[in-house]
Amino acid sequence: MIRLRQAHRDDAASIAELHARSWRLAYQGLLSDAYLTRELDTDRLNDWTHRLNTPEKNQYVIVAESDEAPEGLIGFACAYGAFDEQAGTLLENLHAHPEYKKTGIGKLLLRHIAQWNAHHYPGKLLHLWVLTKNTPAIGFYRHMGAVQDAEALWDAPGGTQVPELRFTWYEPGKLL
Ligand SMILES: CC(C)(COP(=O)(O)OP(=O)(O)OC[C@H]1O[C@@H](n2cnc3c(N)ncnc32)[C@H](O)[C@@H]1OP(=O)(O)O)[C@@H](O)C(=O)NCCC(=O)NCCS
């Protein structure tokens, strides 16, 4: 059974490890090789240590665990409530462990974030940014009812600019 719980500061290393593992696979060829091979682990650890030690007031981080995977986390998500005037709450990160993809973890985390948003930021939309070439994730978001409504260039770690798309849930209540 999958369990969700709110992250605490001791989770920084575990989240950073899973984040790095996920990016190394999903972002191969999308972020610079130098960053992915040499800087990714330290960068993710610094990022999560900072986020969990000095959280923004509207930050919410949730982790997924399972008895079948006692060695660590099998997923995590991070959201910022009412981040954008129009597009509402930002789903900043959503990752299922690469070995447990398509087992329902992404959907469980997304629905939990939608519940949190409905409870703490009623009436706010939910949105995220995804790399234009991250085709599998885009397929998942479309399947879950999000609509692409903006595009931008991301100043990615490693010094490159990477095209990205915004997806918004205009009726986030349908995720509940
Ligand atoms: C994208 C991601 C979070 C999806 O999570 P997941 O646990 O693999 O997906 P789930 O098993 O929860 O899938 C839920 C539903 O979406 C569908 N789905 C999953 N991936 C899909 C895809 N690529 N295209 C279309 N539908 C998809 C599933 O079939 C399932 O459908 P159902 O509920 O109707 O049966 C996960 O694959 C991941 O971590 N990817 C790597 C990291 C990443 O790119 N994160 C997003 C950064 S913006």
Image (cartoon, rainbow, N blue to C red):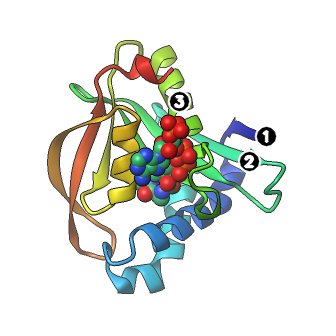
User: How crowded is the residue under tag 1: few (<14 C-alpha within 10 Å), some, or many (20+)?
Assistant: few
Check disc 2: other Cα within 10 Å, few if <14, some if 14-19, many if 20+. some
Residue type beneath disc 1: Met
Dividing the image into 4 quarters, which one contains the N terminus?
A: top right
* Badge 1 or badge 3: first in the primary sequence: 1
Q: Nearer the viewer, mark 2 or mark 1?
A: 1
Q: Is residue 131 above or below residue 161?
A: above
Residue, disc 1: 1
Is the shortest distance between ligand 1 and the CB of mark 3 under 8 Å?
no
Whole-percent x, y for residue 100 in the image: 64, 57
Res 84 quadrant in image: top left
Q: Secondary structure at mark 1?
A: loop
The residue that disc 3 covers is: 111
Q: Residues within 10 Å of mark 3 (few under 14, many from 20)?
A: some
Residue at 70% from the left image edge and 55% from the top image edge: 73
The response on whether ligand 1 sits within 8 Å of label 1 is: no
The answer to whether residue 149 is left or right of residue 36 is left
Which of pointers 3 and 2 lies earlier in the amino acid sequence?
Answer: 2
**Residue carrying label 2:** 65
Q: What's the residue at 33%, 60% (across, down)?
A: 134
For the point 22% across and 49% down, the residue is 165
Are discs 1 and 3 less than 8 Å apart at CB? Answer: no
Residue 55 visible in the displayed image = no
Helix, strand or loop at disc 2?
A: strand
Alpha carbon of mark 2 to alpha carbon of mark 1: how far?
8 Å
Confirm or deny contact between disc 3 and disc 2 (CB under 8 A): no
Secondary structure, mark 3, is helix
Residue type at numbered disc 3: Arg
The reply to whether residue 57 is visible in this rendering is yes
Q: Nearer the viewer, residue 64 or 45?
A: 64
